[in-house]
Image (cartoon, helix red, strand yellow):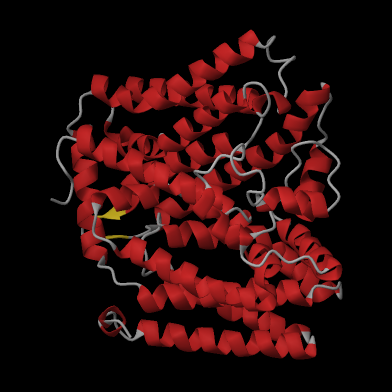
Amino acid sequence: MPDSIKNTGDWRYAFLALLALTGCAIILYVLSGAGWFLSGALLLLGVGIAVSFAHVRLFSLYSYFVISYVSLNLISLFIVGYSGEEGGDYVWMTLSALCLFLLGYFVFLGKSPERDFLLLENISSSIKTIRDGRFFLLLLPVIISALFIMIEVASSGGILAHTRAATKEEAGMLFLLIKYLLVFAMPFCFLMGLGLRQRKGSVRFLVFILFFLSLIIFFFGLRTRSYIVGPTMTFFAGYFCSYIMNYKERKVSIPIRAVVPMFLVLALVLVVSAYSRFYRGALEVQGSVETSAVFEQTISNGDLGYGLIINDIMKKFKGDRVWLYGQSYYRLLFILVPRSIWKDKPENTQQIVGEVMGGKVEYFTLPPGIQGDAYINFGSMGVLIFLIFGAVFARIDSKNSPVLILSTSSSFLPIYHLARGGFTNPVIMIFVIFVGSYLVNRFYLNRKCGD
């Protein structure tokens, strides 16, 4: 057992005992089907997660993963677990995967809240010393991306003639590069939010206008909500980080005054994300969107009910005896090999899932959820991979590096995609964010924070 677990107080031993009780409740539920065992498991997990957030940095790989994973699955767990619908494998995988992730994370976590504070304080101090004109440079990758999109959409006949398929066909490579430029811009968005409170009112207003106009362009040009939700969440992560740095206690904490605004922003982002999912389709056929349908579909098979789709995928793969035997993970080794050279290169898992689930539309992909991905690769034993995920996340979050602090704080988008069932692309995105964090720390900030 690492020394880190010995030096963090009794809370971690109590936390591990809580996870053990949760594991027992999950096993008893799977064996008996009794709903009160499920209730006990959910209650214990809820308490454990609430306790854990008092001992981790709010904007970290851990926080982003837990928030994403719970939001995608919580409602579905209630629907599947208490309705009698077939889904024992889904409940088992979803709950035990989260338990093992928490176990792996807190066994291997070794971090100092005070050191975290000092690094963020140094980054924030560097942003304060930057003049307004130079501060606007943080918008540069975002604005360049928006300009490229405007030029390409205009050349293809305008907004009404533009389709999502066009972003994958003749101009597919250009749009792919634009998407990765936006991923590269995530640490810029975090720093922009972190430093905005120290700016004059006119500067704040102009930054907000340019930033959110760019988001509108991203949505209409890329026809995907990921690249409006990702930059928005990262921007507000930086903005709220400037509020919750508790200078008196020398750690990053969450004051009561910040809780309500944070939940309001999360609710707003959720509404925009849910509505844009359907408005994107309406744009393709120049139709309209009904608010009641948005709410219903968001709960039944959307952002808040995605576990129902994961359950269907798991049942379909099990029934058809289709197993990937680790392909979702080992295909990362071959990302640099073009398909033109290796025609039998392993397919993207989301494409395979789309085909198995009966997708008839070209480019149809369907993420299987991170626990569903483990299941369709290794069956029920795939849950063990979450120990590795937890350990890796812990070691990254534990590093006392300004570049890694900036990278992890800016990684909501790839972590959300990871929780939703991607693997190769989120790993690439995290690497791109790391490169952006290194460059902005090395060449933009006035000093190397933490040195």
Q: Name the quadrant containing residue 253.
A: bottom left
Camera-side residue: 367 or 67? 367
Camera-side residue: 257 or 359? 359
State left or right for residue 126 relative to residue 243. left
Camera-side residue: 102 or 387? 387
Q: Is residue 61 in view?
A: yes
Where does the image place residue 185, in percent across and percent down from the top left? 41, 34
Q: Name the quadrant containing residue 164.
A: top right
Q: Is residue 416 in view?
A: no
Residue at screen point 81% across, 54% down: 356
State left or right for residue 279 relative to residue 293. left
Q: Name the quadrant containing residue 111.
A: bottom left
Where does the image place residue 320, in percent across and percent down from the top left? 85, 66
Residue at screen point 14% across, 39% down: 447
Residue at screen point 66% across, 72% down: 378
Where does the image place residue 246, in percent across and percent down from the top left? 27, 56
Where does the image place residue 35, in percent across and percent down from the top left? 77, 83
Q: Which quarter of the figure is the N terminus placed in?
A: bottom left
